[in-house]
Amino acid sequence: MSVAGSNPTPSPMIAGDALDALIDPECRATIRREIASVDGAEVYFIARLDPDQCIVEVEAHAYGNQSAVPALMQYARPGDVVIHNHPSGHLQPSDADVTVSSELGGRGIGSYIVNNDCSAIRIVVRPFKPRRLEPIDAGVLADWLRPGGRIADSMEGYEERPQQGQMLRAVAGAFNHDGIAVIEAGTGTGKSIAYLLPAIAWALRNEEKVLVSTGTINLQEQLIEKDLPLLLRSSGLKFEASLLKGRANYLCLRKLDYLHRNPSFINLGEAGDQVAELRAWARNTREGSRDDLPFVPDESLWESVMSEADNCLRTRCPFYQKCFFFNARRRAARAQVLVVNHHLLLSDLAVRAETGNWSATAVLPSSRRVIIDEAHNLEPAATDYFGARAGRRSLRYAMRRLLATRTGEGLLQYIAKRLHDGLWKLPPNEHDDVMQKLTRELPIRHAELLAAMEEAAGRLADSLDRGQNAPLHLPIELKRRIDAAERASDWWQEEGEAPLRAVIVIARQYLEGLRAVERKLGQCLADEPTPANASPVLELRSATNKIDSVIGRLMRFVGEGTGECRWIEYRRRPHSRRGPDVTWCVAPLDVAPALRDNLLRRYHSVIMTSATLTVEQRFTWLLRQVGAEDPTRLVIEGRDAGQGSAAPPPPDAGSRLLTTLALDNPFDYDRQVYVGVPMDLPEPTAAGFEPALAEFLVPALRISRGRAFLLFTAYSLLERTHQRLAPELERMGYPCLRQGQSSRSMLTESFRREVGSVLFATSSFWEGVDVQGEALSCLVLTRLPFAVPGEPLAEARIEELRRRGLDPFYHLVVPQAVIRFRQGFGRLIRSRSDRGAVLICDRRVATRSYGRMFLRSLPTQNIHCADVDQVLGRMGAFFDGLEDQSSG
């Protein structure tokens, strides 16, 4: 080991099998690719090591010579290694190498020299071994949140919350003991501070990155813009935090520049007018993220300029140092706390599972500790991510850039013109072959593929239309499960599978031709990899990959994969010019094994939290959904529990420390909320429910003076109820807002601004909407949020539970509905000063045995089940009392 101020003494050169213990093979491949991308010139990398001192993460940071090295100092940290290549293949360090390595060594950073194919390494300064992980002191951190503590004192109007301290201790315990903590913490607990503070302390103390994954953009913004800056100001801890989004959220400067210089490259129509606006924004934005745009870009334009992995020059790009995506990646690599969403986390897990890479950077930087907020959405997000959807529109969308059906313009024509004009040179025999493909073969295959997809979608649509026997002027929207019996039927074989397989056959031929052109052009332009030459070829590769992806999803649908549900979705809009829409869908029946093996057994510490994780105060449902019901199956893969930990493993070495904690709610619901159940309303399935509901709501909303959320489980009931009530409510002075009129954020803002508003909403409004104060004083849950009957995936999961001898109603249907019910209930009370009424218009909560599961899961048991008049009377008295308190 080198010490500060000493001259490094190079070690012998290491090659052959010994390299595997020194540097991960995937990292060697990354180094080779980066060096090759700059034609063998000098490249400087920053590498990070695992506890065995093996390099497991590497990224290029500087190019050319030692003059670029100072730029590395802000990114490398003690324990890292800086690697650079000698293009000559002679690995003896020069005087300049020794000088740089000495400076790096003084900072605790190792130094290696490699040859261009990374088959040999010379160690100049050995890496500094990381110290044993050190536990964090939960007691000290909890004291910071008490009156007189450094964080409490920095917050105006701070109120101590014992639940926050309890949660902090549980999170710290999971970090210290390589444990899994599942924590239910209601609104007002301060849960984000309770997990961020120990996460930051752990990351700084042990130099380990911590991931925080959320389910919604709103929570990401709260963490990045409010909670983390607060802790940076008040805690005294010096840390970096960063938000990393999916790659497609970032602008690609090279693609934008090329589009500006070559406006005929892609026919954008009127959307081309936005190119100048994008360029002006790009000059001033720091993040380069679509979310920061001051206008909504045209979809086709954004697709033309967004960052993509298969449409990237990486280090050869003239904009590499300015690249928004790679700058975000660099900030992420530097940060101690990295905020992502569930989709990005799952994408990272999927890549790691497929490649076997559990230590180097994949989609995200390597990490051993993860916090999953809004964890009740993890299983649905995993189901969506590991599923697949493809249809007529998605294929046309993937193909549209290659060739416009009406004009014949597109990327194929653009490339052919460059070849024809002599801007690109191919050998004569290859030139004729490529031109034949571009001008004749590929356009024919393109048209054949579109026609085959129209045939497949059209035949299925016609067949479904006949089965519905609905008049042509009426819209149709349906889902039909294609189970084993259906797949074997003559109907499906003739109308479904055969046309779909024809699409796949033609697509393979089309893709083969596209790949052949891409290879020829790539070879031709390898000697001149300028953006002007590379952009069209990269665009061709990207479009080809998009088509390949759609076809891959269709192949999965017709494949024989087990443990999956398949269904088709059909939508007919009589007045739409786009025609009927058919989508083929696949989803896994159970994502618990994937989450257990790729999340719980790979991360050393996993914290899951949300306001709604329990059903009847028990975590059984969630633990089963994420694969955590059996601690003996959660031992960290790749080592014994406790190895490298800050504390010994649990007493039972065959299991893993699993902590579940349901915190008391910090709000006084018995005092802050009136909960009424009108028992003489018909059940929601009865014919008279809709008019009775409307008749009940008019006086109820008069009592609350509007200021209400009306939450529905089906859009059809929402629309009919809105039609019944809106005219009268408007006459009473209560503006009516309806989901679908504008975006969720705009509707929420209108609701806050227009005093007395009534918002009719469904689906996403049951969670994630935060309206504090008297603007929201009445919440109406029109019916229990059971899944829509006939939903294909729910049906398939129900059948699977029955096959396993379990009651699906109590193992799936009711727990799902209870979690959603609790989310909806939680919209009303968001602070200690909030007051209001919750009206549950589904009497089954009191009349059915399963109804008790809903009521016992609420934060108050002061629930009034009575006839309509009594419910309204008590509700009126409750609001009168609020006015008396206000006037008093």
Image: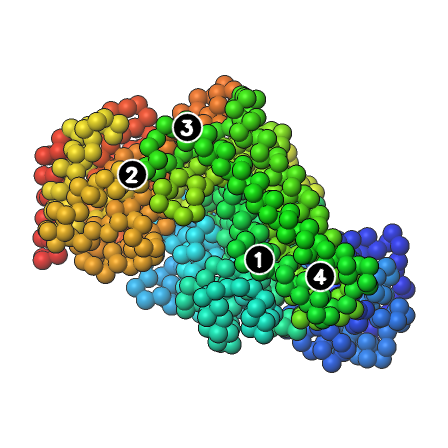
Badge 2 crowding class, 10 Å Cα cut-off, few under 14, some 14 to 19, many 20 or more, is few
Name the residue tied to disc 2. 716
> Is the C-beta separation of discs 3 and 1 under 8 Å?
no
Q: Distance between the residues labelled 3 and 2?
A: 23 Å
Name the residue tied to disc 4. 58
Q: What element carries label 3?
A: helix
Q: Distance between the residues labelled 3 and 4?
A: 58 Å
Who is closer to the viewer here, 128 or 524? 524
Tell me which label, 4 or 1, sits earlier in the chain. Answer: 4
Tell me which label, 3 or 1, sits earlier in the chain. Answer: 1
The relative height of residue 284 versus residue 748 in the rendered view (above or below) is below
> Is the C-beta separation of discs 3 and 2 under 8 Å?
no
Q: Which of marks 2 and 4 is in front?
A: 2
Q: Is mark 4 on a helix, strand or loop?
A: strand
Q: Which residue is drawn at 44% across and 30% down?
A: 464
Q: Nearer the viewer, mark 3 or mark 1?
A: 1
User: Would residue 484 be seen by someone viewing this image from the given angle?
Assistant: no
Q: Nearer the viewer, mark 3 or mark 2?
A: 3
Tell me which label, 3 or 2, sits earlier in the chain. Answer: 3
